[in-house]
């Protein structure tokens, strides 16, 4: 079992990675927000199959949470996470304190906020009086689905991933396809900004009963957890309908919404979009993905299923 | 005299740079839009004083031009540029054809434009039906001064520089302080996105008579070129006034505007801002910079002077 290096400083993380890459080894990064479950471990196994060294980052990114969202209650368990990562044969864990605080001592910059107008949307980064002001915007892909109900979300995701890429400098990075739109946003960012990093999308991992694994599942009451099974049930019903010849997206969406609503879920969105562009599909004439976001109690869950005809 | 490598492909450029960096050598990048003058050569000399290998990029970036601006008439002279770079002892020139076209063959992405709403401002990249959609926004620093009259400018600058950084992967990059706001935008982007690149700001180089060197100077008529000397004259007058005890920025700005207007220049802006934050100053109580943009005929010129008390 290799030793698990726990690294908290950006510069030490970069040095660790470069020491390996400059010798011709490959490094894969698995970015996470911690509270690790079998879904994360699956990403790590994927990473291990394609790279010599594995870095897992654990960082609950305030840049992707609006002040109204659940940053403060996002679950964490660092001790448990480190044990799981050690058991999984991970080489390094990057768990920084705050990625948005500058170490430059550039004090005058801290006063720049009132010089010009406010940005259109605020995350917990702006809310916290940090002086970070650079954001990566994937302007089209960021807008629909989760971006519609969480306006600062993908701006925050793309930005923190760009930061992690510049700190870890990996050859490969692995993202879960449960966060389908996130995966596509990252792919597009990597292509558009010329990061020399191969992005791998890994399949969704589900509980024994079909619920997609998520750190937020822990917040579900037993009753809501039961109701939440309707999400995967609705996705499977849609897949069966498509296999039976259904091509009309409105009807598939109605079927999906009905299944979830009848179980007691509150729909955020149900959409069928093209797999690469995330463009809304009317009829299924190319590979699409059916994406769902719904609330059960105070917990917002997302899930999806690729429909390849 | 070392051989000048002319590199057109992203992957070859990155390989060239890595081959040197992985052996412990340092690489400095000097990004330019070509039509090189003594100002650029000064940046190259600065780069040579701090790094073992020098890369100069020549790329007229459509991402920083609005369709109404002078992209099509921006001057170029690649043959002359290569001779100057060879004479200057530059090691590699990166002159890509189009940095916004993807080589991925990701055709479905080309249709994503109509899926969601348009971006707030358009550059010549969107205008040209490329499918690039990722932009780096330095949200506060990008808004004032040149950003007010050129809304897509700093978005385009930050984005293309991020791309160049990811392609060349330099240790150091050198920017001219004539483009003062641009230099600060890049510094902030590097800090906020954790690029491991040292940014050097190099002093303005002037013609014998004080006109700041600029590729656009070639478009000035002889009469307008004479009138344009009023810019540096106005900056020097303001500096003398500050040395004489003047601390009121409105009065200094009025003095500056008067000098340029009386010579026949059309003011775009005259501002006095703090050097780091670019926050508007009312009284000079810390290091500031007096920034000017003005039109002479069809040519927009910028210049500035640091005022350190």
Image: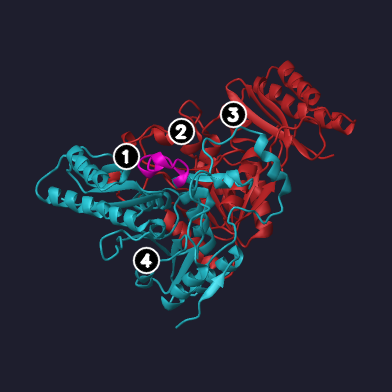
Chain colours: A red, B cyan
Residue B208 position, x and y percent, is: 26, 66
Q: Do residues under tags 2 and 4 come within 8 Å of each other at their CB atoms? A: no
Tags 4 and 3 both on a single chain: no
Instruction: Measure the C-alpha gap from mark 2 to mark 1.
Output: 17 Å
Identify the residue at horizontal 45%, vertical 40% (top origin). Answer: B151
Tell me whether circle 2 and circle 1 mark residues in contact (CB < 8 Å).
no
Give the residue at mark 1: A112
Task: Report which residue position mark 4 lands on.
Answer: B43
Tell me the number on the disc at residue A123: 2
Distance in Å between CA atoms under marks 3 and 1: 29 Å
Residue extending farthest right: A244
Chain letter for the residue marked with disc 3 in the picture: A
Can residue B177 be seen here? The reply is: no
* Discs 3 and 1 lie in a common subunit: yes
Q: Same chain for marks 2 and 1?
A: yes
Cα gap from disc 2 to disc 4, whole angstroms? 38 Å
Q: Mark 1: which secondary structure?
A: helix
């Amino acid at each position: 079992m290799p030793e698990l290096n726990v690294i908290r400083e950006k510069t030490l993380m970069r040095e660790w990675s470069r020491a390996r890459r400059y010798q011709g080894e490959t490094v894969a990064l698995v970015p996470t927000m911690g509270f690790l479950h079998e879904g994360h471990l699956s990403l790590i196994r994927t990473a291990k199959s394609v790279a010599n060294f594995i870095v897992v980052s654990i960082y609950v990114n305030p840049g992707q949470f609006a002040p109204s969202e659940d940053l403060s209650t996002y679950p964490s368990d660092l001790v448990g996470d480190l044990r799981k990562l050690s058991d999984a044969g991970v080489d390094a864990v990057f768990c920084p304190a705050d990625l948005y605080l500058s170490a430059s001592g550039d004090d005058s910059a801290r006063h720049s906020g009132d010089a010009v107008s406010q940005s259109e949307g605020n995350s917990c980064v702006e809310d916290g009086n940090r002086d970070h002001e650079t954001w990566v915007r994937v302007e089209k892909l960021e807008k629909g689905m989760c971006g519609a109900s969480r306006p600062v979300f993908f701006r925050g995701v793309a930005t923190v991933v760009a930061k992690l890429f510049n700190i870890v400098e990996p050859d490969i990075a692995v993202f879960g396809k449960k966060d389908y739109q996130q995966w596509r946003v990252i792919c597009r960012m990597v292509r558009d900004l010329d990061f020399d990093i191969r992005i791998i999308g890994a399949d969704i991992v589900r509980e024994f009963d079909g619920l997609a694994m998520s750190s937020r599942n822990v917040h579900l009451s037993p009753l809501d957890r039961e109701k939440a099974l309707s999400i995967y049930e609705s996705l499977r019903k849609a897949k069966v309908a498509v296999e039976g010849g259904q091509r009309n997206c409105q009807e598939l969406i109605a079927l999906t919404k009905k299944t979830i609503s009848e179980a007691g879920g509150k729909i955020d969105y149900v959409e069928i979009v093209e797999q690469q562009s995330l463009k809304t599909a009317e009829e299924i004439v190319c590979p699409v993905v059916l994406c769902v976001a719904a609330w059960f109690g105070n917990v917002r869950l997302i899930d999806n299923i690729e429909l390849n005809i």
